[in-house]
Image (cartoon, rainbow, N blue to C red):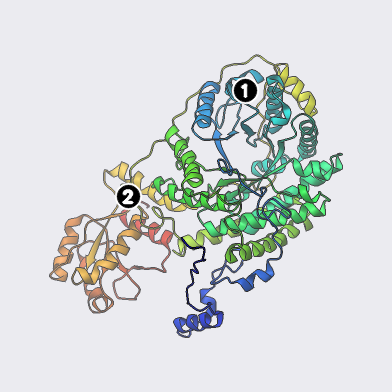
Amino acid sequence: MTDSVLRLAGDNPAPDLDAWRAEADAALKGAPFDRLIKRTLDGVARGPLFTREDLDEVGDVGEPGAAPFIRGLDAVRDPYLPWQIRQTVDLPDPKAANAALLAELTSGASEIALKLDCTGKTGVAARTVSELQTVLDGVLLDLVGIHVSPSRMGPQHAALFVAALDASGVDGKAVRGGLGLSPIGQKSLAGGGAADLEQRFDRATEAAQLVAERYPNLKTVSITASAAHDAGATEAQEIAFALAGAASYMRVMMDRGLSADAAANALEFSFAADADIHLTIAKLRAARRAWARVAEAFGVSENKRAMALHVVTSGRMLTARDPWTNLIRNACAGLGAAAGGADALTIRPFTDALGAATPFARRLSRNLQIMLMEESHLGKVADPAGGGFLHETLGARLAEAGWKVFQDIEARGGLFEAVKAGWLQDQIAKARNAREDAYDAGKEALIGVSQYPELDARLVEVESRSYTVPKLDAPVIEPQPFADKVKAAAAGAQVRELDLPEPEWTPMAPARIAAPFEALRDAADAFKDKTGHAPKAFLATLGGLADFNARVGFATNRLAVAGVVTDAAHAYDSIEACADAFSQSGAKLAVICGTDNAVTESAATLASALKAKGAGEVWLAGKGDHDGIDHAIHMRSRILEDGARAHKVTGVAS
């Protein structure tokens, strides 16, 4: 044994930035250095290299568990539960929901997101305290955090939950969780209901005042920045949504008598994590940094400026096709959330884009978190990303970008006014369109959907739910002060279904990136169901296997994105033999594959022969303008355009 310290760098000299730049310039061979700089959709530079010098722009990030809380709430994480594993329960039957809830808790979950819906269509049909008690039967409410998910019936659901807590007799100081009130977020998603917003603000403030006395560790308001993310928002827009929402609620509650500390304590922030691990980490650090400034501006005490941070994996990144690939996306997102400092994490089921989750899908989501904790050891240190040149610098830059958008929203009268005017939705739509364009252009990829689709991917199961909500003869919880709502709920009143508001503005609707690509596959499947065979293309090859193999692979992949199948490619002795094989294939679309030289020499002749045999169109795999070629597919052609055109040729689309 020795007490000497092993220098991992050995005798290697310290890296020199100028030397690195010289090597980079040499590798670029005269191309501009900016080619190496990757930027977010907000225009924030994320490389190509971060160094210690970049930390000059970061400033003091503090210590874990201390202001400004960029590095998280806790100085030392719980070694057994470094963050809360929050699982969603949404089965419509209260008894089935209870069984699922208990299964989650006994298998590793530590918190529950309880999605309520009195109709049973999108959540648990718990309409009364009695039905909610059925859902919560056997749950130790002083140990398990129950978070009511935001909904249009939020004030009624919150009153129901508080009444159930009151009836349980549990020590109020030991209760944690959340009421899920989200007036601005729900109005943004509904696209209307401005007239009763002030009343909703009243109810939220009254609820915050009530639980501050009875259940001081319950969060009242949920700021659902993740909804903006799933609608297509950039990192800066998501941060700005959260800040503007928080500022709105702070003003509302302070104007109605709450102290700055009490108002801040009532808030929980919900952000999204996607498969871009480093950007997720930086975004969460940026959000904490920016919120600390907002809290300071409102006069919140320094030790109360920490952001209560719930992170949910992105819905927009998930695919309905080849959903097994979602397991990888969720793993990356979970890693980013955990390393980024999430206090609670919800990993969506990998079948989320397909329908209701089975117990198997819920188990994978839960176990993924356990693996991140116990096998990846992400909770062994308080701040895994702390001090990283990339994460600290990018986090500071994202905070600045988010702050600018936040100021823009504030200048327009605050979050609700920016939504009501449609400005924020327009800004998010521009970002969503730019992101979709990047996938269409092949600059970004969804494996299994926009690249390398698996046409015979193993199917997954989703749960088929059929539940008839029993009739209930009970008065409804009327619009009234929150304390009176709780009394009515305790007396047996039921939650009523609210009518959808009249449309007043464009709602902030979720949009999956995969949707336009999956629409092509859906159309191809419909064609197959109708005709008995899938749409087909023929690979017309030039030369030997080594000559055409790469372009055959590309063409096969590009066509498969649209659900168009190809037979195995063969080498042909002559152009005539290739044309004869095409005539036997039954295809209407032929794609020529070969080297540039072979294409230059023979593409026009082969195209003529193929059309003579009945080809509706002849395409080229690769760039080039040749007689007889109707369309070229290559790395720079548009994926969706290629697919739509293939559908026209093969008969999928008229």
Residue closest to the eye, 426 or 273:
273
| 3D distance between C-alphas at marks 2 and 1 | 44 Å
Badge 2 local density, few (<14 within 10 Å), some, or many (20+)?
Answer: some
Residue under the image location 49 percent in, 32 percent down? 107
Q: Is residue 89 left or right of residue 650?
A: right
Q: Could you tell me residue 17's position as x and y percent?
A: 55, 79
Mark identifier at residue 254: none
Q: Mark 1: which secondary structure?
A: helix
Q: Residues within 10 Å of mark 1 (few under 14, many from 20)?
A: many
Identify residue for label 2. Answer: 455
Q: Which marked residue is nearer to the observer: mark 2 or mark 1?
A: 1
Disc 1 residue type (three-letter): Leu
Q: Position of residue 250 (x, y in %)?
A: 79, 46
Vertical order, 174 against 419 (above or below): above
Q: Is residue 427 visible?
A: no
The residue tagged 1 is 132
Instruction: Report if residue 174 is visible in the image.
Output: yes
Task: Tell me the residue at 48%/77% (across/down).
Answer: 12
Q: Nearer the viewer, residue 172 or 365?
A: 172
Q: Amino acid at mark 2?
A: Leu
Q: Position of residue 350 (x, y in %)?
A: 45, 43
Q: Position of residue 344 (x, y in %)?
A: 60, 43
Secondary structure of residue under mark 2: loop
- Vertical placement of residue 611 versus 183, above or below: below
Q: Judge from the rendering whether residue 591 lies leftward or rightward of residue 414; answer left or right.
A: left
